[in-house]
Amino acid sequence: MELKIQKIYVNDLAEFWKSISQSDNEHLPISLKRVNSYFHNPNKVENLPVLYLGYLDGKLISYRSVLQDTFKKTNGKIVNFAWLSGVWVHEGFRRKGLASKLLNEVYSDYNGKILSTNLGANSQKLMAG
């Protein structure tokens, strides 16, 4: 199964929302409220993705969203990182490693600087290996 991954950046969210809200997708990967919150995030990083979409044969079958954040080290250097925010895999494609593939993309893009909190049982299994 060859998963095609599309990455959406903060500055592309409004246009992306417009395109998906007018489509016949059975599942929307982001809400308008979330688009607005990402756009107004004071710690947004425009050159890093916030939404990872997985397609098979042109059909959306998985997604992962992240919330961007930053912190300042004692030396003044700003470090960008991502909070894991949402994940979804179409019920017909679960347990095939798709969520892991998207997580690996986030890990690569954010140089391993990702955080998560309040993990459910399935998320804990995914993060463990």
Image (spheres, rainbow, N blue to C red):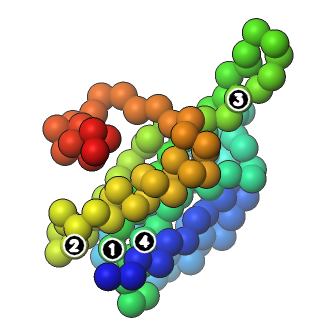
Mark 4 and mark 1 in contact? Answer it, CB < 8 Å: yes
Give the mark nearest the N terminus, 2 or 1: 1
Mark 3 is surrounded, within 10 Å at the Cα level, by few (under 14), some (14 to 19) or many (20 or more) other residues, namely: few
Mark 2 is surrounded, within 10 Å at the Cα level, by few (under 14), some (14 to 19) or many (20 or more) other residues, namely: few
Question: Which element type, helix, strand or loop, lies under badge 4?
Answer: strand
Compared across the picture, whether 53 is left or right of 127 comes to right
Q: Residue 76's x, y, as percent? A: 83, 16
- The answer for how far apart the CA atoms under marks 2 and 1 are is 7 Å
Of residues 36 and 123, the one nearer the viewer is: 123
- Residue type at the position of mark 3: Val
Of residues 86 and 105, the one nearer the viewer is: 105
- Residue bearing the label numbered 1: 61
Residue 100 appearing in the image: yes
- Residue type at the position of mark 1: Ile
Q: Residue at x 23, y 67 (%)?
A: 96
Q: Residue at x 35, y 56 (%)?
A: 100
Indicate which disc residue 79 carries: 3
Give the mark nearest the N terminus, 4 or 1: 4
- Residue bearing the label numbered 2: 93
The residue at the far front in this view is 129
Compared across the picture, whether 6 is left or right of 129 comes to right
Above or below, 56 relative to 11: below
> Where, quadrant-wise, is the N terminus in this rendering?
bottom left
Q: Residue at x 43, y 43 (%)?
A: 85
- Residue type at the position of mark 4: Gly
- Residue type at the position of mark 2: Phe
